[in-house]
Amino acid sequence: MNIYLVGLPGSGKSTLGRQIADSLQYTYIDLDDAIIASEGMTIEDIFKHKGENYFRELEYHVLHQTFSKKNSVISTGGGAPCYFDNMQRMNENGTTLYIKPDIDELVKRLLSQGRENRPLLKGKNDKQVKDFIVQKYNERSPFYELAKKTFSSNQLKASDILRYLKTL
């Protein structure tokens, strides 16, 4: 079984994904890291030099490569579920989990983690970060809500997700 984690930046997809993969002895795939490896450049440089459309097509192809994998936990980029048929295909090829802390928690995490590491937040002040998160939440929620299970918690632990997965 493949497990796809979706949600906004700062939701904890990467941290939880690694923990879940370790617990299940699954392969862990961070979609952004896989894109960086396949392209040989950072996400920021891909956006800067080749544009968002190029990035989204690359993301689509790298995501679709995961469909042939077995027993993997895949942390998607925040936008991945919102383009092409990505969310539908993830649902067809695995279990999709929407990690959904509230907006204030997301903003707090992103401000404390350093926005300079995130191309879409780089150079934004605190208010601009919150406005960005609210905008992306409104735009992306309809796609995220298509996930098979939503975890709405600011204190979500890998053990909560593992308990759910045992019921499948």
Image: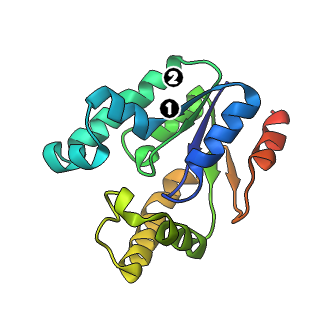
Residue at image coords 47%, 72%: 111
Q: Residues within 10 Å of mark 2 (few under 14, many from 20)?
A: some
Query: What whole-number distance in Å separates the C-alpha atoms at marks 1 and 2?
Result: 8 Å
The image shows residue 154 at horizontal and vertical percentages of 69, 66
Q: In the picture, residue 53 is in which quadrant?
A: top left
Answer above or below: position of 42 versus 109.
Answer: above
Answer above or below: position of 122 versus 90.
Answer: below
Residue at image coords 76%, 33%: 23
On screen, residue 105 versus residue 113, left or right, reads right
On screen, residue 114 versus residue 24, left or right, reads left
Residue 113, labelled with which disc? none
Any part of residue 146 in sight: no
Answer above or below: position of 117 versus 92.
Answer: below
The image shows residue 115 at horizontal and vertical percentages of 40, 65
The image shows residue 2 at horizontal and vertical percentages of 62, 27
> Which amino acid lies under the numbered mark 1 shown in the image of this protein?
Arg
Q: What kind of element bears circle 1?
A: helix
Residue 89, labelled with which disc? 1
Out of 90 and 30, give the one closest to the viewer: 30
> Which amino acid lies under the numbered mark 2 shown in the image of this protein?
Phe
